[in-house]
């Protein structure tokens, strides 16, 4: 049984949307909540409608689209933190949505991402971000930005999060090592021997406490 689509169906008709290989199903009335957007203007005459599968196909980011479709349902648009800001803004533009539609708390986060981008551009002497906006940065510049974001922007990507966790781990290990070095059980006592003359012909080696040294293991930890 075919599913009715937007072109000639009632408000309760179902609509199937295939976004990047992930299928979403909603109602025509849901998509009509936001007029003047791409999804509110769907019709069977459009090129991305598949009459055989009876669905609309969009080669876009399915993760971002789940938030966009939820915006039609709830009236609240949230910024998915697992994608970068520019990608999210590109998706908003494609679906005919405005950046101002994002919830205030997430809008502030987008501002932070944008400010971070401007900071990177200035840090490397790229004050004119026209090349960046047009996606024309040379490969070496893109690589420099990626490396900088990995170490300076922990939430910019999964790799950055992993690097941050590893950095925190080694910081904690360093602190723990510093504390343990103060405990006598983790220190090595160096003992020197001195010759003591018992008589004119006999001497005896007598141990004398010299000082305590840090266990060599801690030196290895600090070196790492």
Image (cartoon, grey):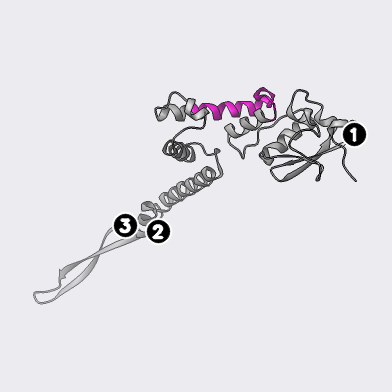
Between the residue at mark 3 and the residue at mark 1, the CA separation in whole angstroms equals 79 Å
Q: Secondary structure at mark 2?
A: helix
Of label 3 and label 1, which has the lower sequence position?
Answer: 1
In the rendered structure, are the residues bearing label 1 and label 2 in contact, judged by CB atoms less than 8 Å apart?
no
Residue 213: numbered disc:
3
What residue is shown with label 2? 186
Give the quadrant of residue 23: top right
User: Is residue 114 inside the magenta stretch?
Assistant: yes
Relative to 71, is 60 on the left or the right? left
Query: On screen, 177 above or below 24?
Result: below
Q: Position of residue 165 (x, y in %)?
A: 52, 46
Q: Which residue is more in the foreground, 162 or 80? A: 80
Q: Position of residue 69 (x, y in %)?
A: 75, 34
Of label 1 and label 2, which has the lower sequence position?
Answer: 1
Mark 2 is surrounded, within 10 Å at the Cα level, by few (under 14), some (14 to 19) or many (20 or more) other residues, namely some
Single out the mark in the foreground, 1 or 2.
1
Single out the mark in the foreground, 3 or 1.
1
């Amino acid at each position: 049984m075919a599913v009715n689509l937007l072109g000639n169906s009632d408000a309760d008709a179902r609509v199937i949307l295939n976004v990047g290989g992930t299928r979403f199903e909603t109602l025509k009335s849901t998509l009509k909540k936001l007029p003047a957007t791409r999804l509110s203007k769907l019709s069977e005459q459009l090129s991305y409608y598949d009459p055989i599968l009876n669905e609309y196909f969009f080669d876009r980011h399915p993760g971002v689209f789940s938030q966009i479709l939820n915006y039609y349902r709830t009236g609240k648009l949230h910024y998915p933190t697992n994608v970068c800001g520019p990608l999210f803004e590109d998706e908003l533009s494609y679906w005919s949505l405005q950046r101002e539609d994002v919830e205030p708390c997430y809008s502030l986060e987008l501002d932070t991402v944008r400010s971070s981008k401007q900071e990177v551009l200035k840090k490397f002497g790229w004050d004119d971000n026209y090349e960046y906006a047009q996606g024309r940065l040379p490969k070496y510049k893109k690589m420099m930005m990626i490396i900088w974001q990995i170490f300076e922007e922990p939430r910019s990507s999964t790799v950055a999060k992993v690097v941050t966790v590893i950095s925190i781990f080694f910081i904690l290990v360093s602190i723990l090592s510093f504390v343990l070095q103060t405990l006598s059980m983790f220190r090595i006592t160096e003992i020197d021997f001195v010759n003591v003359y018992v008589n004119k012909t006999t001497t005896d080696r007598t141990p004398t406490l010299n000082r305590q040294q840090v266990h060599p293991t801690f030196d290895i930890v600090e070196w790492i």
